[in-house]
Image: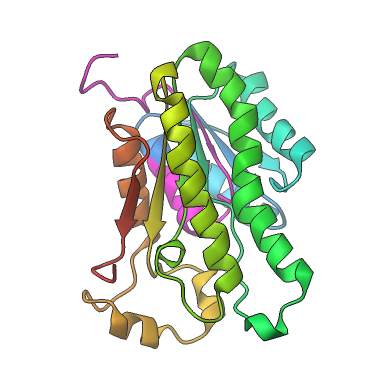
Amino acid sequence: MAYGESILRSSVVIVTGSSRGIGRAIAVEAARRGARGVVVNYVSQLDAALETARLVERQGSEAVVVRADVSKWDEAVELVEAAVNKWGRVDVVVNNAGILEPKEFAEMEPRDWQRMMEVHFYGALNVSRVALDYMLKQERGVIVNISSVLGLRPEPLASHYSAAKAALIAWTIAVAKELAEKGVRVFAVAPGGVDTDMARVWGDMDWVEEEIPLARLAKPEEVARIVLDAVENPYITGDVLTISGGLL
């Protein structure tokens, strides 16, 4: 592929957790940049996922909506195969699915940290591993892992979330080195405070905005543009791109 040629144009993109927030913004931006097809993934919010699909199609791309809990291997397989069955390929995977449940460690039960790891870490591994078989055959593909600044700068009430996001970063760097010579790039994006429904589980976000030098939360669309700019840059792999408004 010649430098400057759009990697996203005519590509097939899977975005996990794309019924709303950052995932929706990435799905729509991928369509705006010419993706042939976008797989919209959800677990419980069907109406929101259908709205994401409608926004994708408004940009001129095709969309497939797939319910799948990516922490479960069989459902991750079904998610990737939905793309392959529809378009015959997978070019970009964005592992965005996530949960955020603030809690003190002293109040956590094993299921709290197990579920956090299952969704953020194992979910990304599951989808990536299934998609990788197709990417290797194509000798072309990009895997993006949406981490968090909390994976680099852990905070109280989020020790399990921070640990899962840190694990995702470590895996990203290691596997990027393995796959570079095989035509598959892997990198992570670590947003700071982003104005999403998930972030609002913290309650009043004024305290976060006070710590951010730019004095506001990021918009999901601002994160989406960074993600897809990096997808289209053929020199980015193994990197962790922060978008924090100066927080980190």
Q: Is residue 19 left or right of residue 218?
A: right
Q: Position of residue 97 (x, y in %)?
A: 59, 52
First to last magenta residue range: 1-29
Give the position of the N terminus as an image quadrant.
top left
Where is 111 relative to 91, above or below? Answer: below
Q: Is residue 178 magenta?
A: no
Name the foreground residue: 178 vs 147. Answer: 178
Residue 55, can we see it?
A: no
Which quarter of the figure has residue 5?
top left
The count of marks equals 0
Q: Position of residue 136 (x, y in %)?
A: 53, 17
Q: Position of residue 152 (x, y in %)?
A: 40, 63
Q: Is residue 10 magenta?
A: yes
Residue at x 44% of width, y 17% of height:
182
Where is 50 relative to 10, above or below? Answer: below
Q: Is residue 60 left or right of residue 137?
A: left
Q: Position of residue 95 (x, y in %)?
A: 54, 45
Residue at x 32% of width, y 81% of height:
209
Which quarter of the figure has residue 114?
bottom right
Name the foreground residue: 243 vs 22. Answer: 243
Name the foreground residue: 116 vs 41. Answer: 116
Residue at x 34% of width, y 72% of height:
217
Give the position of the C terminus as an image quadrant.
bottom left
